[in-house]
Amino acid sequence: MRRYSAFSLAREAMRSHTGWDKQWDNPEPRSRYDVIIVGAGGHGLGTAYYLAAEHGITNIAVLEKGWLGGGNTGRNTTIIRSNYLYDESAGIYNHAIKLWEGLSAELNYNVMFSQRGVMMLAHNVHDVQVAQRHIHANRLNGVDNQWLTPEEAKAFCPPLNISRSARYPVMGAALQKKGGTARHDAVAWGYARAASARGVHIIQNCEVTGIHRGADGAVTGVETTRGTINAGKVGVVAAGHTSVLMEMAGLRMPLESFPLQALVSEPVKPVFPCVVMSNSVHAYISQSDKGELVIGAGTDQYTSYSQTGGLHILSHTLEAICEMFPMFTRMKMLRTWGGIVDVTPDRSPILAKTPVKGLYANCGWGTGGFKATPGSAHVFAHTIARDEPHEINAGFTLERFRTGRLIDEAAAAAVAH
């Protein structure tokens, strides 16, 4: 009987879902590219696509140590929203939503973007005040958001328990109707196919083990498990491991890595119409197109590169979900998973060129990376191509950690997923 590795199974799945054929089957690396992107997740593949589609740069290699979409892109809970507090955050995430709305048509591939609405619950007076502050700030930035009474929240999401005797009583909710979900792996495959069609090389099973610099300190290429590959520009988009890669170039990043867990239930018929998030209990829930309830929690409280995380995090989350949605108490858990997220001191991303000439970083998204995928990729491609930031990502530099002008979404953005 023929044996299949995880890589070969993923490759066959990509072929069957996207129509890939042998011309996309892990090409041999060239000796030199104009741009190397490290990381074949949604952000990395999207960056390569926009470099080719909008900036005419097609001599690009996207290097992935495993298989494309096998990192955090395939380990998230698909939530998309832009109701962040600060101007910079609202700008990048709202830019992403606008791109999400036309992404399937642009890539000619269904990413299953569903604007079913994201509702964020308020359980106490502080939650109510914070949510209403967000609503006013969002409207000033052109981001849709509205306040719902408990009764209106239940009308929008009938399974919600709004009893005043509940452990987490619902005092209202903020609703962004343009928010929703998309299929994570479809996003990676769609960008991969579109980028490859424009000549981008996507090289899997190719781990970067070193970053080379010339006599003037500028990047000259990378060392990989498949040999040396030269390039004038290198963009690092490797969630959870950016700090390790940057150390190869002698650059220390203000990042910590944390496990982030989630789970799905057994599949059932459509029963949950939207996405619901709770800041006070740090839990969120939606239903996938396959019928599974997708449930997630916050990051673990300790730094780690583990993809398992602490069991107590999931236990607390499930208790909260069952309290808010009693009808789900008899559901069975199907599987759990964990990812690794990079976190900056202010919980906002770094999306900029670095002090090393020719080296660019897209990292530090914490739990907000997936929702930003097209917006992040679009402005990162601009930054690499023109060696200067787009106006949308101008604030997300390393310099802010020296000046103190932080974009502190840690406490401001409610649940950071």
Image: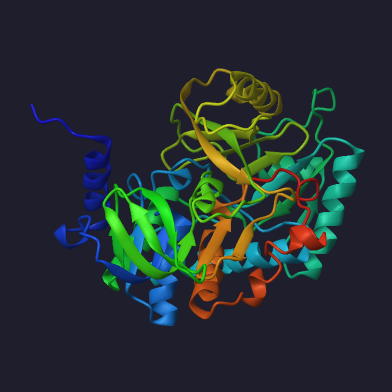
- Residue lying at 52% horizontally and 59% vertically, measured from the top left: 373
**Residue 394, placed above or below residue 86:** below
Q: Is residue 319 left or right of residue 53?
A: right
Q: Which residue occupies the foreground of this view, 136 or 5?
A: 5
Classify the position of the C terminus by image quarter: top right
Spot the residue most to the left.
1
Classify the position of the N terminus by image quarter: top left
Determine if residue 28 is in view. Answer: yes
- How far across and how far down the image is residue 51, in percent? 43, 74
- How far across and how far down the image is residue 206, in percent? 31, 50
Q: Is residue 225 left or right of residue 324?
A: left
- Residue lying at 32% horizontally and 46% vertically, measured from the top left: 67
- How far across and how far down the image is residue 60, in percent? 35, 69
Q: How has the structure been colored for display?
A: rainbow
**Residue 326, placed above or below residue 352:** above
Image quarter of residue 361: bottom right
Q: Which residue occupies the foreground of this view, 189 or 241?
A: 241
- How far across and how far down the image is residue 33, in percent? 33, 70
Tag count: 0
Spot the residue most to the front.
215
Q: Is residue 140 left or right of residue 302?
A: right
- Residue lying at 67% horizontally and 58% vertically, measured from the top left: 82
**Residue 340, placed above or below residue 242:** above
Determine if residue 194 is in view. Answer: no
Q: Which residue occupies the foreground of this view, 377 or 203?
A: 203
Q: Is residue 19 left or right of residue 333?
A: left
